[in-house]
Amino acid sequence: MNQRVDIKSVLRDPVKRRELMVATLIATQAREGVTTTREQAEAAYDKVQEERQRMLISQRFRVTIVCACKADYVVGYGATAAEAHATAGKIYRRNHGRRKPFDTVLDEVTPDGTHYEEVTP
């Protein structure tokens, strides 16, 4: 029986996402000839999720600075908006000298940690 699966709803649901990823880890390892138990796959998934959370905390904000030519941009990340802006500014000055930027955009990671959204002042 063929059924379509709404992958976005699966990925939004933490329980379904975990089941999918654990099954994928086991299948991928089996394809490579490595036997992996469910417990090993779950432990690997948990470790990756913990690392992801640590990364999101340290890179909670993202600043994108667009060059005046509008053909290039730089991105800086940081735990605070000021830190992200300082990082992006340093990269921008190194690549573009004293040219004024066209635009600067501040984004913050969403509470579920899946993507960044623009912060409006």
Image: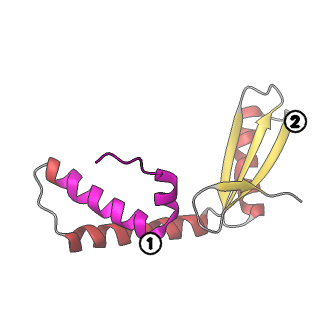
In magenta, the rendered stretch is 1-29
Q: Position of residue 24 (x, y in %)?
A: 29, 55
Q: Residues within 10 Å of mark 2 (few under 14, many from 20)?
A: few
Residue occupied by mark 1: 50
Q: Amino acid at mark 1?
A: Glu
At x 21% / y 70%, what residue is drawn?
38
Residue 25 colored magenta?
yes
Determine whether the residue tagged by mark 2 lies in a helix, strand or loop. Answer: loop
At x 27% / y 60%, what residue is drawn?
23
Q: Does residue 17 lie above or below 67 as drawn? A: below
| SS majority, magenta | helix
Q: Is residue 13 left or right of residue 4?
A: right
Q: Position of residue 108 (x, y in %)?
A: 71, 60
Q: Residue furthest front?
A: 1
Determine whether the residue tagged by mark 1 lies in a helix, strand or loop. Answer: helix
The disc at residue 100 is 2
Q: Nearer the viewer, mark 2 or mark 1?
A: 1
Q: Nearer the viewer, residue 112 or 72?
A: 112
Q: Is residue 87 left or right of residue 45?
A: right
How far apart are the two marked residues, 2 and 1, measured between alpha carbons?
39 Å
At x 57% / y 65%, what residue is drawn?
56
Q: Amino acid at mark 2?
A: Lys
Residue 82 colored magenta?
no
Which quarter shows the C terminus?
bottom right
Residue 48 shows in this picture: no
Q: Position of residue 42 (x, y in %)?
A: 29, 71
